[in-house]
Image (cartoon, rainbow, N blue to C red):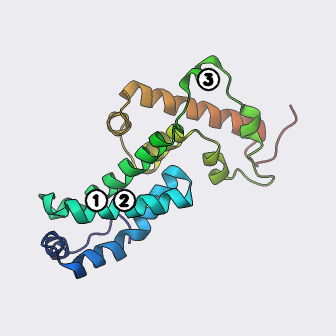
Amino acid sequence: MSFSKRLPTKVIIKAQKGDKFALTTIYQEFKVPVFNLAYKVTLNTAASEDILQQVFEKVINKIIFLDNPSTFNGWIKTITYRASIDYINKKKLHVDLSLVESGNVDYEKLLFSINEESLDIEKYLKNLADRERVVLILFVVEGYSHREIGNLLDITEGNSKQIYKRLLAKLSKVSNLAGYSGKQKSL
């Protein structure tokens, strides 16, 4: 199941009343999408497992406060994003914008992440700062606006746009130096 597939409303309503079978059904249906989303944001298996546990603890404790059962999918997805972002912030793994602004970014290290045959997106993502990766995933993959990203990350809309613009510049530089075939050109 993914976040886009809906559970029957009656399952959510039963879960709100404390029905253990309904809560188990929710867990079984959403454990993979929650884990996958947490992993996309953190790129850390152990952290993603911890986030999975945190998300379902919160679901179990807070589902009774969910006013509209039809919004459950968005609600659990938001909880997952916020838990993932909290993990990043707690571990102090966010981008040092002063280094980026001063031009002290190690693009050479970024270039070494390119596979001989093709641009490996996962390797590229691992070389991004956590905040950059989160902005990229939220904007490109999930379709969030920069205003929504700003609200989620507690940054300004302009800061989100600036982070995204820098990502595009990095990607452009990497793809120009490596060529679209994925093979590095000599410098």
Residue placed under numbered mark 1 in the picture: 58
Q: Relative to 14, is 35 above or below?
A: above
Q: CA distance from mark 2 to mark 3?
A: 33 Å
Q: Secondary structure at mark 2?
A: helix
Q: CA distance from mark 1 to mark 2?
A: 6 Å
Whether tag 1 and tag 2 are in contact, CB under 8 A, the answer is: yes
Whether tag 2 and tag 3 are in contact, CB under 8 A, the answer is: no
Residue placed under numbered mark 2 in the picture: 54
Residue placed under numbered mark 3 in the picture: 99
Q: Inspect the image, locate mark 3, and give the three-letter code of the amino acid beneath it.
A: Leu
Q: Is residue 13 left or right of residue 136?
A: left
Residue at 53% of width from left, 41% of height from top? 130
Q: Inspect the image, locate mark 2, and give the three-letter code of the amino acid beneath it.
A: Gln
Residue at 37% of width from left, 59% of height from top? 54
Tell me how many marks there are: 3
Whether tag 3 and tag 1 are in contact, CB under 8 A, the answer is: no
Q: Where's residue 97, x and y in %?
A: 54, 25
Q: Closer to us: mark 2 or mark 3?
A: 2
Q: Closer to us: mark 3 or mark 1?
A: 1
Query: Image quadrant for the C terminus?
Result: top right
Query: Image quadrant for the N terminus?
Result: bottom left
Disc 2 packing (10 Å; few <14; some 14–19; many ≥20)? some
Q: Secondary structure at mark 1?
A: helix
Looking at the image, tell me whether mark 3 or mark 1 is earlier in sequence order. 1
Looking at the image, tell me whether mark 2 or mark 3 is earlier in sequence order. 2
Q: CA distance from mark 3 to mark 1?
A: 36 Å
Disc 3 packing (10 Å; few <14; some 14–19; many ≥20)? few
Q: Inspect the image, locate mark 1, and give the three-letter code of the amino acid beneath it.
A: Lys
